[in-house]
Amino acid sequence: MIHAARASVPQSLALLAGLFASVTVNAEIGTKNTLDFELSNGRQFIKLSQLPAQTTVINFWRSDCPPCVREMPILAELAKSRQAQIVTIALQKPVETLNAPEFIQAALHAPVVSLSGPGQPRGLLARFGNPAGALPHTVVLDAQRQPCAQRTGEITPEWLNNAIARCTSS
């Protein structure tokens, strides 16, 4: 019986190693997939994974958040430059976005991809590195859609340019 126990220890260790490797691979695959979403732009649903694979800035905002509002022209200018793809996610009812000031409405037009967030945004924000749910929150993804920079709080043109440079060189 002792001999059988010894024989089962290496087998058990091999089994555990195999399970651990499987969990690690699945965790890595899961990490790569967790940053995908499918949200509405008011006309159709847009899936992050179906947008062109390039450096992408994702900005979570609300129209009643002063720093969020101040960021909109910065994001619109960057979108026009085509240095990165800009995706804004309004964490409010679509009617609230429609009632936002005109300069915000102007900033939300193409080439900006403007989406409405989910009714309960905490899970989406947590997946993008913001479990507290604070706004504004900006995440920069590289061309493989992996996060390479993020900031909770108001962004500046300098921060955004540095983040994009860091993400395009990786």
Image (cartoon, rainbow, N blue to C red):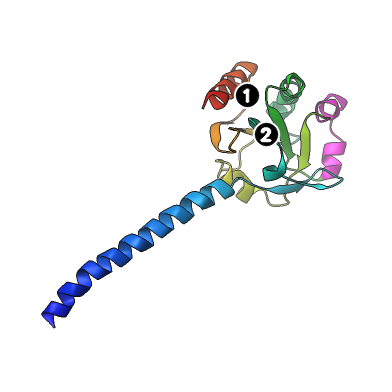
Q: Is residue 97 within the magenta segment? A: yes
Secondary structure under tag 2 reads strand
Neighbour tally class for label 1: few under 14, some 14-19, many 20 plus, Cα within 10 Å: many
Left or right of 166, for residue 65: right
How far from the left and from the top, in percent, is residue 58?
Answer: 66, 34
Q: Which residues are magenta?
A: 94-109
Closest to the observer, 107 or 113: 113
Question: Which element carries disc 1, helix, strand or loop?
Answer: loop
Q: Which numbered marker is on residue 59?
A: 2
Query: Which of the two discs, 1 and 2, labels the residue nearer the N terminus?
Result: 2
> Left or right of 124: which side holds 22?
left
- Residue at coordinates 56% horizontally, 27% vertically from top-left? 167
Say whether marks 1 and 2 touch (CB < 8 Å): yes
The question of residue 125 being in magenta is answered with no
Q: Which residue is mark 1?
A: 155
Classify residue 61 by image quadrant: top right
Which residue is located at x 60 percent, y 45 percent? 35
Quadrant in which the N terminus appears? bottom left
